[in-house]
Image (tube, grey):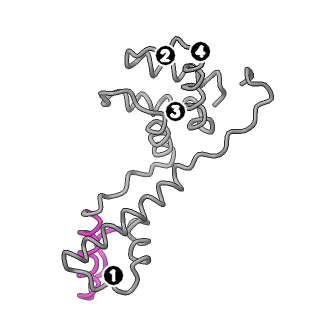
């Protein structure tokens, strides 16, 4: 997305939520710079589509990071990860099925696979409340790592002239 395209997106976001951009040139430039640094690698049409989807249900104006996540999720067709307790329930179900000689009936997400790998062999015997807490804590850290990779922001390319693009 070029800087001019970003201007139109930011103005649309502010207008949709009946917000005013600052009248101070320095503050306005800081807002545009912050939005550009988070969205520069995305296509305008994708980001606009994601914003419009958010605007239908969001009561408050989204931050650029929210638009970034929605755009990437729409592009990759990846949904959000399960909540930790849901992942725990799936893991318990899978463990019982496999230990009973049954094939797994639930698809295993990358986050669940990585959590079990991180915990190691003890994961297969987990069943107590303290096991659940340890599992959920590990799962949350795995999801945070995966999200950091998924939504990573590449460096802003150097511009030839600050007024170009």
Q: Are marks 4 and 3 in contact (CB under 8 Å)?
A: no
Measure how far apart labels 4 and 1 are at the Cα level.
Answer: 56 Å
Residue 94 on image: x %, y %: 28, 76
Q: Which residues are magenta?
A: 86-107
Name above or below for residue 75 compared with residue 97.
above
Q: Residue at x 27, y 86 (%)?
A: 125
Q: Residues within 10 Å of mark 4 (few under 14, many from 20)?
A: few
Identify residue for label 3: 47
Image mark for residue 123: 1
- The Cα atoms of the two marked residues, 1 and 2, are separated by 51 Å
Residue on which the image places disc 2: 21
x and y percent of residue 119 in the render? 39, 79
Q: Position of residue 41 (x, y in %)?
A: 62, 39
| Disc on res. 25 | 4
Labels 1, 3: front one: 1
Crowding around mark 2 (Cα neighbors within 10 Å: few <14, some 14 to 19, many 20+) is: some
Side of 51 relative to 27 (left or right): left
Disc nearest the viewer among 4 and 3:
4
> What residue sits 44% from the left and 66% below the top?
110
> Going 44% across and 33% down the picture, which residue do you hit?
63
Between residue 144 and residue 48, name the one nearer to us: 144
Give x and y (percent) for residue 126.
Answer: 26, 81
Mark 1–mark 3 Cα distance, whole angstroms, equals 40 Å
Discs 4, 1 touching: Cβ within 8 Å: no
Q: Is residue 147 left or right of residue 85?
A: right
Label pair 1/2, CB-CB below 8 angstroms: no
């Amino acid at each position: 997305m070029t800087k001019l395209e970003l201007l139109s997106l930011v103005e649309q976001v502010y207008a949709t939520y009946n917000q005013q951009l600052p009248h101070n040139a320095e503050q306005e430039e800081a807002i545009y710079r912050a939005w550009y640094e988070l969205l520069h690698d995305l296509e305008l049409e994708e980001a606009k589509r994601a914003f419009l989807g958010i605007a239908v249900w969001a009561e408050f104006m989204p931050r650029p990071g929210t638009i970034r996540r929605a755009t990437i999720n729409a592009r990759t067709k990846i949904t959000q990860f399960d909540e930790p307790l849901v992942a725990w329930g799936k893991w318990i179900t899978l463990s019982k099925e496999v230990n009973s000689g049954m094939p797994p009936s639930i698809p295993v997400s990358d986050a669940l696979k990585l959590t079990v790998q991180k915990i190691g062999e003890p994961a297969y015997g987990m069943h107590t409340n303290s096991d659940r807490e340890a599992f959920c804590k590990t799962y949350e850290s795995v999801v945070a790592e995966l999200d950091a990779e998924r939504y990573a922001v590449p460096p802003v390319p150097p511009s030839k002239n600050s007024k170009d693009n």
